[in-house]
Amino acid sequence: MYDIIIVGAGPAGATLARLIGKDYKVLVLEKRDFKERHEYNREKCCGGLIAPDAQLMLARFGLGMPKSILVNPQLFAVRVIDFDNFNESYYQRNYINIDREAFDRWLVSLIPLEVNILYNCLYKSYEESEDGVTVKFIQNGREYREKTRILVGADGALSRVRRQCFGKLPLPNLYISIQEWFKTNGNLNYYGAIFDREITDFYSWIIPKEGHLIIGSALRIDNNVHKKFELLKKKIKDKGFAFEEKVRTEGAHILRPTSIYPVYTGNNRVALIGEAGGFISPSSAEGLSYAMRSGLELSKAIKEDFNRYDILYKTNTKSLLWNIRIKNMKLPAMYNKHLRKFIMKTRVLSFKVEDF
C-alpha cells in the first residue's frame, strides 16, 4: 500500500514527489524514460522559456539550474507582432531559454531516493474501495496493479486521471498547440508574440533556440488547423523571417481556463495538480509556475492533515484561482483587436531597438 501514487513526472508531479518523498511512501508513474535520452521523450510541445512567475517559484524553492539546461540565446525582450492592426512593438521581459527535456530530467533528479519511480508506464485506470484506490498501469507491455491511499493526476491537459474520475465536470477550453523547428543562421535575440485573428483567437510565437527557429501557435481545434498553421508560416516569411530546413514538428493539447469553474482540485481520494486540474495561464498559456505552485500547495495540505488534504488543498489554491481570474481580466487588452491597437499606439512600457 502506497500513501500516494503520482501519475506524471513533469514539473507538477516531480515537484510534489520532491516535497513529500521523504515523509510518505510514494510511487511515480512516468510514460517517458529519463534514464536515457530518447527522441521519444521530445513529445512535449513547449517553447522552453521560463517566464518570471516560474523563475519566482524556483527562487522560492531555493533552486538554481545547472548551466547544462540553458540554451542560447537568453532573452530580454518580446517583439509583439500584431497582424490584425499592422503594428508591432518591443517590450522588456526576461525569459530563461532552456532545453525543456533537460529541465524535466533535472526536476526528476531532485526527487528523493526514497521515492519509487517507474518509467515507460502508461496509466490505465483506477478502482476505489473502502481502504484506498487500486491503480492499473502498463509498463513495457505488461499490466500491473498497485494500491494507494491517494491518487494524484499530474498527467497534463488530456489527463486520463481527470477524465476517468471527474469525467462529468466541464473542462477548460481545449486548444491544439503546434510548433515546428527550423535550422537557421539568423541572429534573433527576442521572443516573438504574434496576434492574428485569421489564425487563432489565442496567439502564436517565434522562439530562437540554439541554431534553430521555433514557430508555433495555439489553435482552436477544427478542420482547418493545418491550413491555419501553414498560413501563419507564410505570413511570418512574408514579414522577412528566414527559415528553410524543417527539423521536426511537435504537437500537444493545452487548456485555456477562461473562467475558474472548470479548474478542479479533486476529492478525498484523487487530487489534480498542474494542467490536469486546469492550472495554466489563460492569457499566455504559461504553465510551469502553476505546475510547481499546485504541487507545492498539495504537499502542504498532505503534510498538514493527510485525512483532510482535499479540503486544505482547495483552500491553498484559492490564490491560484485569483491569479487565473486576474489573467482573464487582461484578456480584452491582449486579444481584443481595437483595445490592443489603442494600447500599442500609446507605446506605454515599449522601447525602441537601437540600430548601430
Image (tube, rainbow, N blue to C red):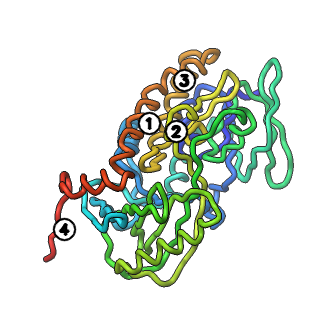
Which residue matches tag 2? 279
Which residue type does callout 3 highlight? Tyr
SS category of the residue bearing label 2? loop
Residue at the farthest right position: 142
Q: Closer to the observer: label 3 or label 4?
A: 4
Instruction: Say which residue label 4 marks.
Output: 353
Q: Is residue 331 left or right of residue 139?
A: left
Disc 4 crowd rating (10 Å Cα; few below 14, some 14-19, many 20+) is: few
Name which quarter of the figure residue 223 lies in: bottom right
Under mark 4, the amino acid is Val
Q: Answer yes or no: do the residues labelled 3 and 2 have beta carbons within 8 Å?
A: no
Mark 3 → mark 2, Cα distance in angstroms: 13 Å
Cβ–Cβ below 8 Å for labels 1 and 2? yes
Where does the image place residue 245, in percent across and percent down from the top left?
Answer: 51, 83
Name the residue carrying label 3: 313
For the image, the number of numbered tags is: 4
